[in-house]
Amino acid sequence: MSNPQDYLPIALQTLIAVGFVVTTLLLTGKIGPKRSGRQKEENFECGIEQYGNARSPFSVKYFLIAILFVLFDVEIIFLYPWAVNFKELGIVGFVEMVLFIFFVVAGLFYVIRKGALEWDR
């Protein structure tokens, strides 16, 4: 059983960290320089002069590829804990991971079959 005293170091460290952040933000806002001007208030994007409308539409394909990347990337992250605990999980863990990989690959084939990765469409 754990006692409330066991959590005192964690609470103290959290309090110190939050206190440091709040203190730093307040102090820099109070004692920092306050300058304004035309050049400071201009938009700045990586040193490149802006041109055109910022609201130009992006292709839906760009967002689809980004979402698919995140989806498959997050699914593949689940392979790391399985690889670390491979021996402890035994045959049941192996069968479960084979099913998991099967569903990931089936999802990939579905995406390919639907043409989601083709840029020419």
Image (cartoon, rainbow, N blue to C red):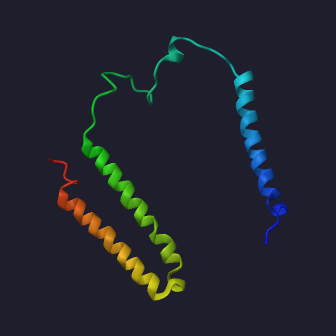
Quick check: 82 left or right of 32? left
Count of labels shown? 0
| Quarter of the picture holding the N terminus | bottom right
User: In the visual, does 84 lie left or right of 47?
Assistant: right
In the picture, measured across the screen, residue 97 lies left or right of residue 68, that is: right
Vertical position of residue 11 compared to residue 102: above or below: above
Please tell me which residue is depicted at 70% across the width and 32% down the height of the picture: 25
Q: Quadrant of residue 72?
A: bottom left
Quadrant in which residue 92 is drawn = bottom left
Q: Position of residue 71 (x, y in %)?
A: 37, 57
What residue is shown at x 79% (from left), y 45% (from top)?
A: 16
- Looking at the picture, how far across and down is residue 53, in whole percent? 31, 23
> Which residue is at the far left?
121
Q: Residue furthest top?
A: 38
The furthest residue to the bottom: 91
* Closest to the observer, 12 or 32: 12
* Image spot of residue 105 (x, y percent): 29, 69
Residue at left offset 41%, top offset 79%: 96
Residue at 33% over, 55% down? 68
The percent position of residue 24, horizontal first and vertical second, equals 73, 34
Q: Is residue 120 above or below residue 85?
A: above
